[in-house]
Every structure is written in structure tokens, then in C-alpha cells.
Amino acid sequence: MQDVSLDIAGGEFLAIMGRNASGKSTLTRLIGGLLLPYAGEVEVDGINTRNPESSRRLRQLVGLMLTGADRQFVSNIVEEDLAFGPENMGLPANQIRQRVDTALKMVAMEEFAKHPPYLLSGGQKARIALAGLLAMNPRYLILDEPFSYMDSRSTVELIGLLQRWREDEQGTLILVTHDQQTVRQADHIAVLQEGRICFNGTPEELLGQEQDKLRQWGIEPPEISLLAEEIDQHLNWPAVGHVSDSGQLVERLWQLN
């Protein structure tokens, strides 16, 4: 990472985008305290991630879900896996049981409490991995490509679950993703390129960028922009030009009459 400066407000939904190896996963690990910065500072709720005395508190504040939910399972039974974090916090058995039950209910996976997590589907594994984080009552959730190997329906369900968590718990969500339908719901988006932040703004500002620039950042332009591009190619002149939503496209086409 180089010259990265980023402020994330409490209760915000930040989406992080960029090509592979652009620094997205490194940034999430720096925020979560898994990596320490060589230079500069990373603070979460006023806690400096370099401070070893605050590492325990940081782990309680931040729930970090890495790519590949399977890697986070520590038990062969779902409910035992969810209890692992609260047990390490030293909570009494009744509170652990309550947290596990609540977390399973939040992700609608109560019936799988006794199941082996490795036998679940990709979407179900992601829900259980998320439930393990929720059982810790985090203030921040950082999810690195949670929708990998998930179908569109599972993706929609999971993002809905995360949005409800934000509303109910006033939590902060940091999400690494390539899914454009998801990033449209974010409060703002940071795009990384070669370890630097090359864009930091709203979804509307990002999708309003020129197509060549989006492709340079590893982001596929919106379908409406691609449609406008095809129309211009078919007419063999820039009749429509750059558009970022259907309203702009209709307006441009109407002006051609």
C-alpha cells in the first residue's frame, strides 16, 4: 500500500473495488489488525492497531471474513464453531448459548445448528461464517469477496441480511466486491490500483466515469453504458455518448428524433 488515506464514518457502508492484486485484501487486513502498517497509522475507534495491549479489544470490535468461508471454520459442528469466539472472550455458558442462537436466527440458519459446516453449500457456508462474526457482537464487519461461488439469489439474500444488521446494530460495513448491484447500495466506494486509492466517491460518481477509465480500474461499465456504446457503434457516430442510467439513455435517444 502507498500513500493511502481513508476515513470511514461510523455506520457507513464502504465498498472496496479494484483489479486482483490491487491491494484490496491487504487494506482489509490492515483495518482488521491482521497486518500492521510499515509506515503511517491505522486507527479503529481510536485504537491504534500497532498497540499490542489493544489487540483483544480490536478483535471484539472488528469481525473480519476472509475470502473462502471454509478457512474460518474451527469445528466440525456449526453451533460449536459459532461458540468458539464468545468462549475465548470468557463469557458464561448461558450468554454463549444466547449469542449462538441469536446469530443463527439472524442468518436464518437455525435448523443447521448440528450440521457439519463443510457439508453446506457455498451460500450456507457464507451465512455460517457471518454468524460466527455476529456472535462476537462486532461494531465493524469487514468482508472480503463474500459472494464468491454464490448464485445471484444467495448474493441478494446475504446483502439484505448485512443491510438489516447495519440498521439494527448501527454497524459499519466494509465490503470487498466486484458485484455492481451490491456496490450501488454502498454509501461510498474506494477503488484501488497498484496499492493506491485511485477513486473515492459515491456509486453515482463512480458509474458516471468514462468506460475506458472504469476498465482501466478493472471495473466493467454498467450494462446501460454498454448498450449506449453498442448503439453508437451501430450508428457509426457518437449519437448517444456516455450515459450512466436509463433516464439519460432515453433522453439522448429522444433528442435524436
Image (cartoon, rainbow, N blue to C red):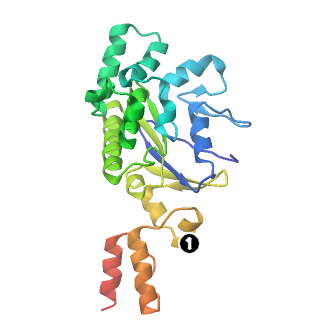
Q: Picture coordinates of residue 22 (x, y %)? A: 63, 52
Question: Callout 1: few (<14), some (14-19), or many (20+) C-alpha neighbours within 10 Å?
Answer: few
Q: Nearer the viewer, residue 195 or 158?
A: 158
Question: Disc 1 designates what residue?
Answer: 212
Q: Picture coordinates of residue 189 (x, y %)? A: 49, 52
Q: Quick check: can you spot residue 59? A: yes
Q: Residue at x 43, y 41 (%)?
A: 12
Q: Residue at x 67, y 34 (%)?
A: 41
Give SS at disc 1.
helix
Q: Residue at x 62, y 34 (%)?
A: 42
| Quarter holding residue 35 | top right
| Quarter holding residue 228 | bottom left
The quadrant of the image that shows the C terminus is bottom left
Figure label count: 1
Q: Nearer the viewer, residue 215 or 147?
A: 147
With 10 as the anchor, is 26 left or right in this view?
right
Q: Picture coordinates of residue 170 (x, y %)? A: 36, 33
Q: Residue at x 39, y 77 (%)?
A: 227
